[in-house]
Image: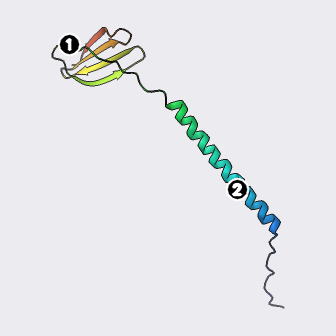
Amino acid sequence: MENSPEPEPEFDPAMIRYLRLLVTILTGTMIAGLLVIIFLFVTRLGDQAPTLPDSIALPDGAKATAFTQGGDWYAVVTEDDRILIYDRAGGALRQVIDIE
């Protein structure tokens, strides 16, 4: 038996250039895809800022502790445990809910 080492694999320079080109194209494609995803997030989510009323007329002595809004209304929770629901279009008080 001969104890000769296994022959070294021969690397084809053309194959190495081809693989290097494939890796470069894959890297460029992944970077472009990531940029497209970031662009879509910014354009789709960026313009959905909530619209807040300019001013809210609270009853005398009421101090606001929380604010929330829906489609055509907004609500203010006061320190004296009331929820004041206002109309978004005109700002008129729609409903008062006492919290027990």
Residue 73: x percent and y percent? 37, 14
Q: Is residue 25 left or right of residue 59?
A: right
In the rendered structure, the answer to whether residue 47 lies left or right of residue 32 reads: left
Crowd band around label 2 with a 10 angstrom C-alpha radius: few (<14), some (14–19), many (20+)? few
Give the vertical position of 70 relative to 15 (above or below).
above
Residue 26 position, x and y percent, is 69, 52
Residue at 31 percent across and 23 percent down: it is 67
- Residue at 20 percent across and 21 percent down: it is 63
Which of pointers 2 and 1 indicates the residue nearer the eye? 2
- Disc number for residue 84: none
Quickly name the residue at label 2: 24
State the residue position of label 1: 59
Q: Quadrant of the N terminus?
A: bottom right
How crowded pointer 1 is (Cα within 10 Å; few <14, some 14-19, many 20+) is rated as: few
Q: Quadrant of residue 19?
A: bottom right
- As shown in the figure, which amino acid type bears the numbered disc 1? Pro
Q: Position of residue 49 (x, y in %)?
A: 43, 27
